Image (cartoon, rainbow, N blue to C red):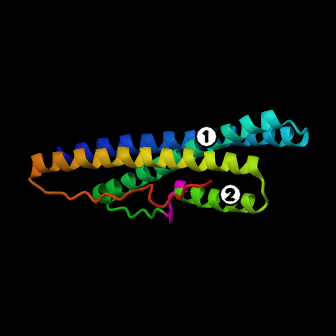
Amino acid sequence: MRNLNKRTKLVESERRFKRACEQIVQLNYSLDALQKRYNRAKTDNNKSFRYSLRLRIAVVDGMRNMYYDYAHQKAESVAELRQELFGEVVDIISEDSSADIEIRTSKKRYNRAKTDNNKSFRYSLRLRIAVVDGMRNMYYDYAHQKAESVAELRQELFGEVVDIISEDSSADIEMYD
């Protein structure tokens, strides 16, 4: 009975992983289209369109990063279940979350724009950092809530005591002028 439950979880995790990957591909297409529109607006010197397109690019990019993190979480779940059920060893390669990489890259761009005194670009980068950080914090809060519910269920079902370690995920984000 327990194996059947794990197989069901495996099928569901694989389905969700595949769906998240499909969404990432679609978001990449959207990002490419928005980037082309932005470049066209930049060559035409159409500042009002550039601003709104930068905002949309930041939002779509943030969504793509969150889908990437979700897909990575599902890939880990699939790898763990495959190990338990079939003895397969699946390596998942990742160093940092895509949100952390995005924030770090945006901070570098912001500092470069600050030294170049490019105020409009700095503003859009501050918005981008805020959007990615907000989405990352929402994801962490959701994951923390799920971890608490899993800990409660494990204690009820198996009598296990699970400690949940919590960190302040927004502590490394600095405020910009």
What label does residue 22 carry, if any? none
Compared with 44, 85 (above or below) is below
Q: In x, y percent, where is residue 143?
A: 35, 48
Amino acid bearing label 1: Val
Q: Quadrant of residue 127?
A: top right
**Gap between marks 1 and 2, in whole Å?**
17 Å
Which residue is tagged 2? 110
Q: Residues within 10 Å of mark 2 (few under 14, many from 20)?
A: many
Element type at mark 2:
helix
Where is residue 103? Give x, y as percent.
58, 56
Residue occupied by mark 1: 59
| Residue under the point 45% across and 64% down | 91
The boundaries of the magenta stretch are: 93-99
Residue reaching furthest left? 159
Looking at the rendered image, the quarter that the N terminus falls into is top left
- Asked whether 85 falls inside the magenta stretch, the response is no
Q: In this view, does 16 lie to the left or right of 52?
A: left
Front-most of residues 102 and 154? 102
Q: Find the residue positioned furthest to the front.
A: 177
Q: Earlier in the sequence, mark 1 or mark 2?
A: 1
Q: Residues within 10 Å of mark 1 (few under 14, many from 20)?
A: some
- Kind of residue sitting beneath label 2: Tyr
| Residue 66 locus on image (x, y percent) | 51, 46
Which residue is pictured at 10% across the width and 51% down the height? 158
Left or right of 98? Residue 40 is right
The percent position of residue 110, horizontal first and vertical second, equals: 68, 57
Prevailing secondary structure class for the magenta stretch in the rendered image: loop
Q: Taking 9 as reference, is 77 above or below it?
A: below
